[in-house]
Amino acid sequence: MKANQLKRKVFNDAIDLLTGDAPEDGVQMVPVDKIEPFHEHPFKLYQGERLDDMVESVKEHGILTPVIIRKTASGYEMLAGHNRQNAARIAGIKEIPAIVKDNLTDEEAWVYVVETNVIQRSFNDLSVTERIAVLATRYDKVCGTKKREEIMEELHRLSGTGGHHVHQQAKSRELIGKEYGMTGRNIARYVRCNQLIPAFKEMLDDGSLTMVAGVEVSFLFPEEQTLLHRVMEKSCIKLKKDTARRLRAAAGTITEESIQIILGLDKPMSEIKKPVSVKLPAKVYHRYFANVATKDVQGILEEALDLYFERRGA
């Protein structure tokens, strides 16, 4: 289908949905269990009170906004609506309304997956790994600008948020940084961390791995990262920036023995430096960390100190 024809179809489908006059082939009732999650879906499902509220709403009102899916050889794959599907399943609903997309490339599918989550939730509310997915997709995985804008216009109409947010976005990290209020350098860090294995991405989320150290580790081959994570987990080691840099320098030659040497695990305990506690004045702590989870404080302090000493040329 030509680009202008697809654009007209997307626009017409969106108008039909908003006016309640969607044709039968525009919105279909699809069995919940026939829809598989999007492969490598990077966003976490709602839990706790947020999930409970959604389940209660679904029980009372049903699924008001259709999910967006695409056909696969075995059924369907979810693009937008993982949480609605999960809530419907819990509520005992067997079928949900869905917009079925045909002939989408993986790059186009990724636009639906990522952008619907950004529309529904503030970027700042996303976890570190979810931000990585968004920024990496914006920077690397999205299709051509014109096609992306067509999809974005459709999604904003379906969500009722209007199209004012849609504009041309080059893949330049500086331009993406302006959109999210981040420096190009930070954008580069997030995008680079998309090369981490899932275990290290989880460590970014729980604060046990800093973004700076994560960037260095991302240059290791996946099998080397897996070996490193296994050694760290077994030895309860927290990875520092300088140690991560030494690991990166050894990329391609990493073995369990070399990891133990770089981490200092081959030294007597008396030679291994112990953590040092530093106290912050209460007013300083509450000024900067009043609304920050305790597990995130250390990572923020380490990044701030890294930036401080980098600026001083240390």
Image (cartoon, grey):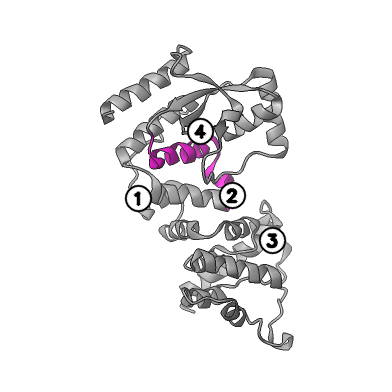
Which residue is at the far top? 21
Q: Are marks 3 and 1 in contact (CB under 8 Å)?
A: no
Instruction: Kindly indicate the quadrant of the structure image that contains residue 206.
Output: bottom right
Lower position in the chain sequence, tag 1 or tag 4: 4
Residue at left offset 40%, top offset 20% = 13
Front residue of 33 and 64: 33
Question: Disc number at residue 39?
Answer: none
Which residues lie in the magenta part?
104-128
The answer to whether any part of residue 165 appears in the image is yes
Lower position in the chain sequence, tag 3 or tag 1: 1
Question: Which callout, 3 or 1, points to the residue nearer the camera?
Answer: 1
Q: Secondary structure at mark 3?
A: helix
Across and down, in percent, residue 79 comes to 49, 35
Across and down, in percent, residue 289 comes to 66, 57
Lower position in the chain sequence, tag 2 or tag 1: 2
Front residue of 29 and 118: 29
Q: How many marks?
A: 4
Amino acid bearing label 3: Tyr
Question: Disc number at residue 171?
Answer: 1
Question: Disc number at residue 285?
Answer: 3
Check the image and report above or below for 270 versus 190: below
Question: Disc number at residue 74?
Answer: 4
Amino acid bearing label 1: Lys
Residue identifier under label 2: 127
Lower position in the chain sequence, tag 4 or tag 2: 4
